[in-house]
Amino acid sequence: MRLTCPFCGSRGLEEFTYRGDALVRRPAADTSLQTDAQAWTDYVYLRDNPAGLHSELWYHGVGCRSWLVVTRDTRTHRVDDVRAASAVAAERSGGAA
Amino acid sequence: MPTDRYSLFSLLREGLRGNTGWKAAWRKAAPAPAYDYVIVGGGGHGLATAYYLARRYGGLRIAVVEKGWIGGGNVGRNTTIVRSNYLLPGNEPFYECSMKLWEGLEQDINYNAMVSQRGVLNLFHNDAQRNAYIRRGNGMRLHGVDAELLDATAVREKLPFLNFDDARFPIRGGLLQPRGGTVRHDAVAWGYARAADRLGVDIIENCEVTGIRIERGRAVGVETSRGFVGAGKVGLACAGNSSRVAAMAGLRLPIESHVLQAFVSEGLKPFIDCVVTFGAGHFYISQSDKGGLVFGGDIDGYNSYAQRGNLPVIEDVCEGGMALMPRIGRVRLLRHWGGLMDMSMDGSPIIDRTPVDGLYLNAGWCYGGFKATPASGLCFAHLLARDEPHPVATAYRLDRFARGAVIDEKGMGAQPNLH
Ligand SMILES: Cc1cc2nc3c(=O)[nH]c(=O)nc-3n(C[C@H](O)[C@H](O)[C@H](O)COP(=O)(O)OP(=O)(O)OC[C@H]3O[C@@H](n4cnc5c(N)ncnc54)[C@H](O)[C@@H]3O)c2cc1C
Ligand SMILES: [Zn+2]
C-alpha cells in the first residue's frame, strides 16, 4: 500500500502514522460530562468500523509532516483519495479556515 | 459400525481395517426453523460456547451458524500461543481459568489438540523492563499462577544462540511461564466442533448471517443466506467481523478491525523448545512439531477487512527476528497470511449482554483471543444460560467504556491500533 501525499507524491506506508476514523467529532468543549456523558463515550470509544470505504487520518511524519484525510476501501486496501486535512477542515467550516 | 470415540483401540481397529470406518468428525447440519440458542460465528469461541452450553446445560437446541467453513477464521490463522501471564485483576483469573481448561481439554473433548506446555519466555533488555516483569511475575504469583524470573545466565543455558550482547538491546533475562506454550489451532476448532456435534449441536457451515430480527425490542432470530432461523437467544462470536454483525442490530461497538500477519518458515531440526518473545520490539516465535518456525509481530495498524497485510510490517517483524536470533537469517519463508483482529479500545474483551434483549456479545479479543478460547466459551455459555456474568468474566462488560472502568493491560488508552 502506498499513499499519494498531495505535497510529496507517492510514498511507502512506512512514512506514515495512522490515527483512525476521520469522521469522529470531538464534542464542543462545554459539553457536560454529567449530562451528556454519552457524547464523550461515543467520541472516545465508539467507531463505525465499516467494511468498505473508510475516511481516515494519516500523518506524514517522515515527509511533509501534514495530516491527511485518506479515503480507502478496508476490504481491498484500495486508496481512492488523499487530501490535506487542513483543506478538508476549511471546506467543512465553509471556507473560513 | 462407524467409529465414535477416539482411543488407542479405535486407532488399532481402523489401522487393521484400512481406515474405512472413521465417521466424519461432525454432521453437515442444515438449519432447523428454530433453536433455543443460535451462536453466530463458528470460530474457536463460537464452537467452545456451543460445546459448554450443551455440556453444562443439557436438553437445549443449539446451532452454530458459520458463513464460511470451520477453521477458516482466526482460530486457524493464529500463531498458537497460549499463556496466562496477565497483570490486571480483571484479566488474570480469566486467563488462568482458560489455562486450566487447556490442561484438561484433550481428555474433555476426546481430541488430540497437541497442547504443549513448553513454556513462554518474555525477554527483557534493560532495568526498567526487568522491574516491570518482576511486578508482572509477582502479580501472577499472587493469583496462584506460575512465573519464574530468569537472569541472563539462565536464559543463556536455555537458548544459547540468542543475540545476548547486542549493543543496543542486550538480553538481561526473562520472565518465564512454564505452563504456557502452544496448542494446535486447527485441532481446537475441529475438536470443539466434533465434541459439540456429539452433544447434538447443529454446526451449519456456509450460512452467512445477514440480519438480526428484532421484535418488540427483543432478538428473535437471524436472517441468513439459508433463510430465517429463529432463536430464543442469539450469541455473537464473530471476532474481526463483530462490528458488522452488531450493526445489524443497530449497535456501535468500541472496536476497530485490524489485520495481523503471521509467518511460517521451512521445516528445520528442533532448536527452539519454548515460545520466546523479544522485549525491545514486537516479535514472538516458536517452532512447530513439523519443524517450521512460527512467528509474528505487530498488527499493521490501520482498519482492514482484507485478511492480508503490507510489506512494512513484514520488514519490521523480520528485523525483530534478526535482532533476537541472527541465525534465522538464511531460513526461507514457507507461508504467510493475515487475519482480522477485533481490536477493542482498551485491549480487553467483551463478554456481555447488549442493549437488545436476547442478544449477547463476545468480542474485542484483539490478537490474544486464541489462548482465551476455552474460558471464553465457558463464560459466554454461562452468560447465555444464566443471564449473569461468569465469576471470572465480571470485568468484561460492554458499558465499562462509558463507566471509565476500562481494563488497559498495556496502558495505551483508547487507541485500538496500539494494543
Ligand atoms: C495472525 C494471527 C496470530 C494470532 N496469534 C495469536 C496467539 O499466538 N495467541 C492468541 O491467544 N491469539 C492469537 N491470535 C488471536 C486469535 O486467533 C483470535 O483472537 C481468536 O481466534 C478469535 O476468536 P475466534 O476463534 O472465535 O475467531 P474466528 O475463527 O475468526 O471466528 C469468527 C467466525 O465468525 C464468522 N462470521 C463472521 N461474520 C459472520 C456472519 N455474518 N455470519 C456467520 N458467521 C460469521 C467468521 O467466518 C469466523 O469463522 C492471532 C490472530 C491472528 C490473525
Ligand atoms: Zn507529505
Image (tube, coloured by chain):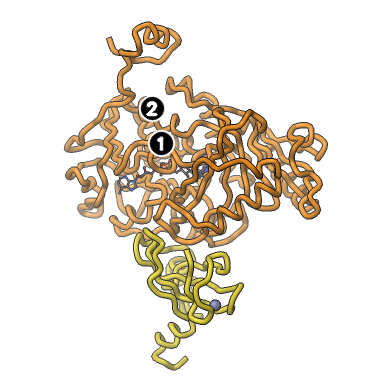
Q: Is residue A86 above or below residue B351?
A: below
Q: Residues within 10 Å of mark 1 (few under 14, many from 20)?
A: many
Q: Nearer the viewer, residue A10 or B356?
A: A10
Q: Residues within 10 Å of mark 2 (few under 14, many from 20)?
A: few
Q: Which image quadrant for residue B270?
A: top right
Q: Which quarter of the frame holds ligand 2?
A: bottom right
Q: Are marks 1 and 2 in contact (CB under 8 Å)?
A: yes
Q: Is residue B16 above or below residue B366?
A: above
- Within 8 Å: ligand 1 and the Cβ of disc 2? no
Q: CA distance from mark 1 to mark 2?
A: 9 Å
Q: Residue furthest bottom?
A: A96
* Chain identifier, orange in the render: B
* Chain identifier, yellow in the render: A
Q: Which image quadrant for residue A53?
A: bottom left
Q: Is residue B121 above or below residue B249?
A: above
Q: Secondary structure at mark 1?
A: helix
Q: Nearer the viewer, residue B169 or B419?
A: B169
| Marker disc for residue B56 | 2
Question: Which residue does the image show at 55% across and 26% down from the upper left?
Answer: B103
Q: Position of residue B7 (x, y in %)?
A: 43, 12
Q: Nearer the viewer, residue B287 or A22?
A: B287
| Marker disc for residue B382 | 1
Question: Which chain letter matches label 1?
Answer: B
Q: Position of residue B283 (x, y in %)?
A: 63, 47
Question: Which residue does the image show at 47% across and 37% down from the upper left?
Answer: B373
Q: Left of B119 or right of it: where is B95?
A: left
Residue A76 seen: yes
Q: Is residue B176 above or below residue A32?
A: above
Quadrant (top left, top right, bottom left, bottom right) of the N terminus of chain B: top left
Q: Give amino acid for label 2.
A: Arg
Q: Give amino acid for label 1.
A: His
| Marker disc for residue B238 | none
